[in-house]
Image (tube, rainbow, N blue to C red):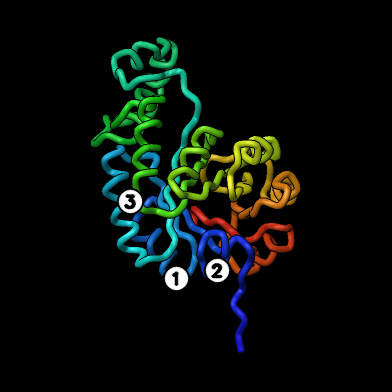
Protein backbone atom coordinates (compact mmCIF):
# COMPACT_ATOMS: atom_id res chain seq x y z
CA UNK A 1 0.00 0.00 0.00
CA UNK A 2 1.41 3.37 -1.05
CA UNK A 3 1.16 6.13 1.52
CA UNK A 4 0.48 9.55 0.04
CA UNK A 5 2.67 12.35 1.33
CA UNK A 6 0.65 14.76 3.42
CA UNK A 7 1.57 17.60 5.80
CA UNK A 8 -0.55 19.87 8.04
CA UNK A 9 -0.72 22.61 5.40
CA UNK A 10 -2.70 20.18 3.24
CA UNK A 11 -5.49 20.17 5.81
CA UNK A 12 -5.39 23.96 6.14
CA UNK A 13 -5.71 24.55 2.39
CA UNK A 14 -7.83 21.53 1.54
CA UNK A 15 -5.28 19.90 -0.80
CA UNK A 16 -4.00 16.34 -1.17
CA UNK A 17 -0.30 17.02 -1.82
CA UNK A 18 2.09 19.62 -0.34
CA UNK A 19 2.79 21.10 -3.76
CA UNK A 20 1.84 24.63 -4.82
CA UNK A 21 2.33 26.33 -8.16
CA UNK A 22 2.08 29.96 -9.29
CA UNK A 23 1.54 30.23 -13.08
CA UNK A 24 0.36 33.24 -15.07
CA UNK A 25 -2.13 30.84 -16.67
CA UNK A 26 -5.61 30.01 -15.43
CA UNK A 27 -5.50 26.62 -17.17
CA UNK A 28 -2.15 25.66 -15.59
CA UNK A 29 -3.25 26.84 -12.13
CA UNK A 30 -6.45 24.82 -12.37
CA UNK A 31 -4.53 21.74 -13.54
CA UNK A 32 -2.34 21.88 -10.43
CA UNK A 33 -5.41 22.01 -8.21
CA UNK A 34 -7.16 19.18 -10.04
CA UNK A 35 -4.04 17.04 -9.60
CA UNK A 36 -4.27 17.47 -5.82
CA UNK A 37 -1.91 20.40 -5.33
CA UNK A 38 -2.59 24.09 -4.72
CA UNK A 39 -2.89 26.12 -7.91
CA UNK A 40 -2.49 29.87 -7.52
CA UNK A 41 -3.09 32.26 -10.42
CA UNK A 42 -0.69 35.21 -10.66
CA UNK A 43 -3.06 38.12 -11.37
CA UNK A 44 -1.00 41.21 -10.68
CA UNK A 45 -0.83 42.09 -14.41
CA UNK A 46 -4.61 41.97 -14.78
CA UNK A 47 -7.18 44.71 -14.58
CA UNK A 48 -9.82 44.33 -11.85
CA UNK A 49 -12.31 43.29 -14.51
CA UNK A 50 -9.96 40.63 -15.83
CA UNK A 51 -9.41 39.33 -12.29
CA UNK A 52 -13.16 38.89 -11.88
CA UNK A 53 -13.45 36.98 -15.17
CA UNK A 54 -10.35 34.83 -14.71
CA UNK A 55 -11.20 34.11 -11.09
CA UNK A 56 -14.51 32.66 -12.25
CA UNK A 57 -12.71 30.66 -14.95
CA UNK A 58 -10.23 29.32 -12.40
CA UNK A 59 -12.90 28.16 -9.98
CA UNK A 60 -14.85 26.44 -12.76
CA UNK A 61 -11.79 24.77 -14.26
CA UNK A 62 -10.50 23.56 -10.87
CA UNK A 63 -13.61 21.44 -10.42
CA UNK A 64 -14.16 22.16 -6.74
CA UNK A 65 -10.49 21.90 -5.71
CA UNK A 66 -8.75 24.65 -3.72
CA UNK A 67 -7.40 27.63 -5.67
CA UNK A 68 -5.89 31.01 -4.92
CA UNK A 69 -5.09 34.32 -6.58
CA UNK A 70 -1.83 36.20 -6.01
CA UNK A 71 -1.21 39.96 -6.18
CA UNK A 72 1.84 42.20 -5.82
CA UNK A 73 1.04 45.21 -3.64
CA UNK A 74 4.22 47.28 -3.21
CA UNK A 75 3.86 50.58 -1.39
CA UNK A 76 3.79 53.37 -3.96
CA UNK A 77 3.92 57.14 -3.85
CA UNK A 78 1.36 57.24 -6.67
CA UNK A 79 -2.13 57.29 -5.20
CA UNK A 80 -4.39 57.51 -8.24
CA UNK A 81 -4.44 56.28 -11.81
CA UNK A 82 -3.75 59.71 -13.30
CA UNK A 83 -1.40 58.76 -16.16
CA UNK A 84 -0.39 62.30 -16.96
CA UNK A 85 0.59 63.00 -13.36
CA UNK A 86 2.53 59.74 -13.15
CA UNK A 87 4.44 60.42 -16.35
CA UNK A 88 5.20 63.97 -15.26
CA UNK A 89 6.86 62.58 -12.13
CA UNK A 90 9.46 60.63 -14.15
CA UNK A 91 12.82 62.46 -13.88
CA UNK A 92 14.37 63.69 -17.12
CA UNK A 93 17.51 61.72 -16.32
CA UNK A 94 15.48 58.50 -16.35
CA UNK A 95 13.91 59.37 -19.69
CA UNK A 96 17.33 60.13 -21.16
CA UNK A 97 18.74 56.84 -19.85
CA UNK A 98 15.97 54.80 -21.47
CA UNK A 99 16.24 56.75 -24.73
CA UNK A 100 19.98 56.11 -24.76
CA UNK A 101 19.44 52.36 -24.38
CA UNK A 102 16.93 52.34 -27.21
CA UNK A 103 19.34 54.19 -29.51
CA UNK A 104 22.40 52.15 -28.52
CA UNK A 105 20.79 48.77 -29.05
CA UNK A 106 18.31 49.76 -31.79
CA UNK A 107 15.32 48.65 -29.70
CA UNK A 108 12.18 48.83 -31.86
CA UNK A 109 9.00 50.48 -30.56
CA UNK A 110 6.69 48.27 -28.51
CA UNK A 111 4.22 46.34 -30.63
CA UNK A 112 1.66 46.08 -27.84
CA UNK A 113 1.00 47.33 -24.34
CA UNK A 114 2.43 45.48 -21.37
CA UNK A 115 1.77 45.51 -17.64
CA UNK A 116 3.89 48.60 -17.06
CA UNK A 117 2.06 50.79 -19.58
CA UNK A 118 -1.35 49.16 -19.88
CA UNK A 119 -2.49 50.56 -16.54
CA UNK A 120 -1.01 52.97 -14.02
CA UNK A 121 0.41 51.15 -11.00
CA UNK A 122 -1.10 53.03 -8.09
CA UNK A 123 -2.64 52.58 -4.67
CA UNK A 124 -6.03 53.02 -6.33
CA UNK A 125 -5.29 50.12 -8.69
CA UNK A 126 -4.15 47.92 -5.80
CA UNK A 127 -7.39 48.64 -3.95
CA UNK A 128 -9.49 47.73 -6.99
CA UNK A 129 -7.50 44.53 -7.54
CA UNK A 130 -7.84 43.51 -3.89
CA UNK A 131 -11.59 44.04 -4.01
CA UNK A 132 -11.82 42.01 -7.21
CA UNK A 133 -9.91 39.06 -5.73
CA UNK A 134 -11.96 39.07 -2.54
CA UNK A 135 -15.15 39.00 -4.60
CA UNK A 136 -14.14 35.78 -6.39
CA UNK A 137 -14.97 32.29 -5.16
CA UNK A 138 -11.30 31.28 -4.97
CA UNK A 139 -10.36 29.96 -1.54
CA UNK A 140 -7.07 31.75 -0.70
CA UNK A 141 -5.74 35.31 -0.96
CA UNK A 142 -2.01 35.29 -1.74
CA UNK A 143 0.34 38.26 -1.71
CA UNK A 144 3.80 38.29 -3.24
CA UNK A 145 4.76 41.74 -1.97
CA UNK A 146 3.19 44.30 0.35
CA UNK A 147 1.03 42.30 2.74
CA UNK A 148 -0.62 44.38 5.46
CA UNK A 149 -2.74 43.72 8.53
CA UNK A 150 -5.65 45.58 6.92
CA UNK A 151 -5.59 43.38 3.80
CA UNK A 152 -5.28 40.21 5.91
CA UNK A 153 -8.28 41.27 7.99
CA UNK A 154 -10.36 41.94 4.87
CA UNK A 155 -9.44 38.58 3.36
CA UNK A 156 -10.32 36.72 6.54
CA UNK A 157 -13.61 38.59 6.76
CA UNK A 158 -14.30 37.29 3.26
CA UNK A 159 -13.57 33.75 4.46
CA UNK A 160 -10.21 33.43 2.71
CA UNK A 161 -7.01 32.21 4.42
CA UNK A 162 -4.03 34.40 3.57
CA UNK A 163 -0.58 33.59 2.25
CA UNK A 164 2.49 35.82 1.99
CA UNK A 165 5.70 35.35 0.01
CA UNK A 166 8.76 36.50 1.95
CA UNK A 167 12.44 36.81 1.07
CA UNK A 168 14.01 37.51 4.47
CA UNK A 169 13.36 36.66 8.13
CA UNK A 170 12.27 40.24 8.84
CA UNK A 171 9.67 39.97 6.08
CA UNK A 172 8.40 36.78 7.70
CA UNK A 173 8.15 38.47 11.09
CA UNK A 174 6.13 41.31 9.57
CA UNK A 175 3.79 38.90 7.80
CA UNK A 176 3.27 36.89 10.99
CA UNK A 177 2.45 40.10 12.85
CA UNK A 178 -0.13 40.88 10.15
CA UNK A 179 -1.86 37.57 10.88
CA UNK A 180 -1.15 35.56 7.72
CA UNK A 181 -1.97 31.85 7.72
CA UNK A 182 0.80 30.53 5.45
CA UNK A 183 4.28 31.78 4.49
CA UNK A 184 6.28 31.09 1.34
CA UNK A 185 10.03 31.38 1.94
CA UNK A 186 11.31 32.33 -1.50
CA UNK A 187 15.07 32.26 -1.85
CA UNK A 188 17.38 33.92 -4.35
CA UNK A 189 17.26 30.73 -6.42
CA UNK A 190 13.81 31.82 -7.65
CA UNK A 191 13.38 33.19 -11.14
CA UNK A 192 11.11 36.08 -10.20
CA UNK A 193 11.12 38.90 -7.66
CA UNK A 194 12.92 37.78 -4.54
CA UNK A 195 15.57 38.69 -1.99
CA UNK A 196 19.28 37.95 -1.83
CA UNK A 197 19.27 35.01 0.60
CA UNK A 198 19.59 31.54 -0.94
CA UNK A 199 16.75 29.06 -0.51
CA UNK A 200 18.79 26.58 1.59
CA UNK A 201 19.70 29.35 4.04
CA UNK A 202 16.37 31.18 4.00
CA UNK A 203 13.91 28.34 4.59
CA UNK A 204 15.13 27.32 8.08
CA UNK A 205 15.28 30.98 9.10
CA UNK A 206 11.69 31.59 8.00
CA UNK A 207 10.48 28.36 9.62
CA UNK A 208 11.97 29.61 12.90
CA UNK A 209 10.45 33.09 12.48
CA UNK A 210 7.06 31.60 11.57
CA UNK A 211 6.48 30.26 15.06
CA UNK A 212 4.43 27.28 13.88
CA UNK A 213 2.75 28.88 10.87
CA UNK A 214 3.09 26.55 7.83
CA UNK A 215 5.89 27.41 5.42
CA UNK A 216 6.28 26.52 1.74
CA UNK A 217 9.84 26.52 0.36
CA UNK A 218 10.29 28.33 -2.96
CA UNK A 219 13.21 29.06 -5.24
CA UNK A 220 14.73 26.33 -7.38
CA UNK A 221 12.21 23.68 -6.29
CA UNK A 222 11.18 21.33 -9.08
CA UNK A 223 11.94 17.71 -8.12
CA UNK A 224 11.05 15.15 -5.50
CA UNK A 225 14.56 15.39 -4.07
CA UNK A 226 14.08 19.12 -3.55
CA UNK A 227 10.70 18.51 -1.91
CA UNK A 228 12.39 16.09 0.49
CA UNK A 229 15.07 18.68 1.23
CA UNK A 230 12.40 21.32 1.91
CA UNK A 231 10.65 19.03 4.37
CA UNK A 232 13.96 18.27 6.06
CA UNK A 233 14.47 22.01 6.59
CA UNK A 234 11.11 22.32 8.33
CA UNK A 235 8.94 23.47 5.43
CA UNK A 236 5.60 21.74 4.87
CA UNK A 237 5.77 21.74 1.08
CA UNK A 238 7.22 23.45 -1.99
CA UNK A 239 5.98 26.39 -4.04
CA UNK A 240 6.94 26.32 -7.70
CA UNK A 241 6.90 29.16 -10.19
CA UNK A 242 9.40 28.99 -13.03
CA UNK A 243 9.06 25.21 -13.40
**Precedes in sequence: disc 3 or disc 2:** 2
Marking on residue 163: none
Residue under numbered circle 2: 17
Tell me if I can see residue 187 in this picture.
yes
User: For mark 3, does the 10 Å Cα neighbourhood hold few (<14), some (14 to 19), or many (20 or more) residues?
Assistant: many
Residue under numbered circle 3: 55
**Precedes in sequence: disc 1 or disc 3:** 1
Image height check: is 225 above or below 123? Answer: below
**Precedes in sequence: disc 2 or disc 1:** 2
Q: Which residue lies most toward the left here? A: 111
Tell me if I can see residue 189 in this picture.
no
Q: Are marks 2 and 1 in contact (CB under 8 Å)?
A: yes
Q: Is residue 39 left or right of residue 179?
A: left
Q: Quick one: quadrant of the N terminus? A: bottom right
Q: Position of residue 169 (x, y in %)?
A: 70, 39
Front residue of 222 and 73: 73
Amino acid sequence: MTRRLRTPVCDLLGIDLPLAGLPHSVAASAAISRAGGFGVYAATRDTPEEIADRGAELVAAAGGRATGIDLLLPKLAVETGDRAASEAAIPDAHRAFVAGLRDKYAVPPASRQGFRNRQVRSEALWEAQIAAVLATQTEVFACGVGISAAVVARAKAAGKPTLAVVGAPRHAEKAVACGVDVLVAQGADAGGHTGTIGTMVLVPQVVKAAGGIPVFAAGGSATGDQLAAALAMGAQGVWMGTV
